[in-house]
Structure formats: C-alpha cells, structure tokens
Amino acid sequence: MNHSKSKKLGITLVGILLMTGVILSLFIFQMKRFIETPRNPREQMVTFTIAPGQSLKQVAINLEKQGLITNQAQFKLYVRYKQAAARLMAGEYQLSASKTPAQILDQLLKGRVKLYRLTIPEGLNMDETAGLVQETKFCDTAPFLALCRQADFIKTLGVDSHSLEGYLYPDTYFFPKQTTCRQIIKKMVTTFHSVYTREWKKRTTELGFSVNEIVTLASIIEKETGDASERPLISSVFHNRLKKNMRLESDPTVIYGDKEFDGRIRKRHLQRKTPYNTYQLRGLPLGPIANPGALALKAALYPDKSKYLFFVSKNDTTHYFSKTLAEHNRAVRKYQLNK
C-alpha cells in the first residue's frame, strides 16, 4: 500500500469514528432527554395495569398508548440498560405523564400499586364476609368459602377447627387488585394470630379452654352484644351457665345452625336439633358462629365477676341481667311482652 492510499484510509477511518461519535452523542443526548423529560407536566393521574407475566415489550407499548411516555422503544432500551425488565411488578399503578420515564420506572420497580380497601365489620359470619370480598371484586364467594372449608389449607394456617369461621379477623385491609382468595384469607387469619397474643393463649389454658372454644364463645358474645360495654357482663353469664352445666340458650346459635330460618325465631327453630342450637345441647356449639373482634375475644377470656345467669334485651341495645329464673321471667314480661 502506497503512502497516498494509507493516508486516504486513515482519513476515512477518522471520519467514520467522528461520525460514530456524533451519532452516539446524539443518541445519548436523546435518551437523556427522554429519560428526564415528562411527556406533559400538567397531566393528571391515570390507572395503569401490568398483568401477571406481561412482557416488557407490551408494558412499553401500553405506556405509550396511555400517553404516559413518548417513545416505547426508548423506554425498552432504558429498562434493559437498567437491567430491570425482570423486576417489573404486576399490579395497578397510579401514574402520570407529569412524571419522567425514569420516575415512572422507579414507581413500577418499587411496586407502588394501587390498593383497594376491604372493611370487614365485627360479627359477620363466613358467608357474609365472603359476600363483602366478592362485592369488592377481589374473589367470588364460592372459591372463598371452599378454601375456608378446605382441611389442608386450614391446617397450614394454624387453625384447629373444621372451618375458618371465627378466624377471618374483622378489620380494614388494603389489597392490590390481583390479590387472590387464598392471599386474602391468609392475611385475615394472620391478623387473628397477631391479635390473639401469648398472654391470651396462657389465659385460655388457665381457664381450661382451647383457643377454638374461646373463639366460639367470643363469637356468641359478639352476636349477643348491642352495647359494646356489656360484652364482659354477657360473657360472665355464659361462663356462669357453663360452670353449672346449663344450656347457653343463645338465639344467634339457633339462627346460625338453622338453614330454614326465615327472619323470626319461632318455637320450631328452638326445638330443631343442630350442632349449633344451644337450646338443645349443653356446652358450646360445634364451632364459632361469626368472626369476633378483639373486644369480644377479650371479654370471653376476662369476663366480669357476677352471679347473673340470664339476660333479656331491653330493646335499646342494652340488656337486663338476672340472677334467678323468676327475676328473668319478670324482665321478659316487662321488656318483651310489655306486661
């Protein structure tokens, strides 16, 4: 190769390098501007969803379609540069085009998903709880209840009962949209275990009960309570009756066990034998009849000291308590029969 040809080749190589450098610089500049520039600084929040198993390509396409970014190809390159594709988390997000692509990616990686509120009031039974879960569109009633009765699943949750009635702890929960029946139930039961402390377990043993028996008693107390302050006194009545081997004769247990109950307790309901009818059986029913809250559980464990054996509703959310059957019958005539 002669000198002139060598010189030309050198000039060509320099030119190529310079051109490559210019193109690379331009690419870096454009990427930096893309990463650091929001599409629209005044844009409002929108809901953006990443479905389980969705690819980076589809996520980027959807971000562009919803007007959150300007260029899906550049977003894909940025995510791959950050080695973040595998860390994108499924769920619903509240995103805005007023945020930069870098900030949007950061939110997706941190899993700051939109949460939905689920409030379970105290005293609802398993069926009613399943209904609320379905209303919030997390999970249908049938699979929820099937899990609540599945022996193997119940065992994994540390519950010694034939169902999860009583252990779906009433509270306000927040879940992302993709939460499953299993995850919701597990959270509720885990919350129950956190509320039912070691001290309470020790107290349970001291009283000669199992945890399931205390939960059963607490569920009856919960259903019988109109005025929250009466829980410990109502508990004392049931404890006193249990010690004397008297039937508990609790109307809510009759209602829970009678599938033909039509809204008003009649003599035939009281006489119908079920595993829950405490007018027909002595001691506690087969299991809990509702999901009690902390105050009802505490009342079951720490009842007031009293000699009361009866109570009757005064129709104002409170009860009249009696020590003898004669006194109780007078109270029934006064408050229930208006005599």
Image (spheres, helix red, strand yellow):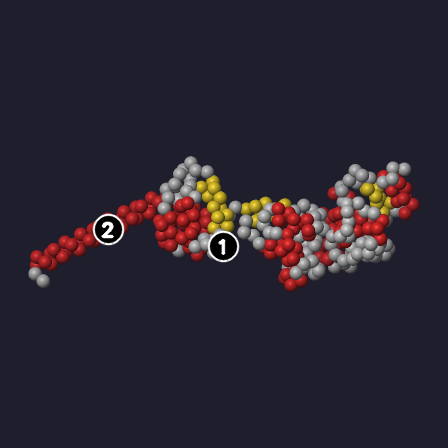
Say whether residue 302 is visible: no
Q: Is residue 129 left or right of residue 25?
A: right
Structural distance between the alpha carbons of marks 2 and 1: 41 Å
| Callouts 2 and 1 close, C-beta under 8 Å | no
Tell me the quadrant of the picture where the C terminus can be found.
top right
Tally of numbered discs = 2
Place of residue 154 in the rendered image (x, y in percent of width and height, measured from the top left):
66, 60
Q: Tag 1's secondary structure?
A: loop
Q: What amino acid type should be assigned to the residue bearing mark 1? A: Pro
Q: Residue at x 41, y 49 (%)?
A: 60
Image location (x, y in percent) of residue 252: 78, 49
Mark 1, residue position: 52
Q: Position of residue 55 (x, y in %)?
A: 43, 55
Mark nearer the N terminus (2 vs 1): 2
Q: Secondary structure at mark 2?
A: helix
Residue 89, given in percent of the width and then of the height, sits at 48, 53
Question: From this viewpoint, which residue is outermost toward the top?
Answer: 42
Any part of residue 228 in sight? yes
Residue, x 40% and y 53% (percent of image)? Answer: 57
In terms of depth relative to the viewer, which is nearer, 210 or 142? 142
Foreground pick, 276 / 198 = 276
Q: Residue at x 59, y 45 (%)?
A: 117
Which residue is located at x 66 percent, y 55 percent?
Answer: 145
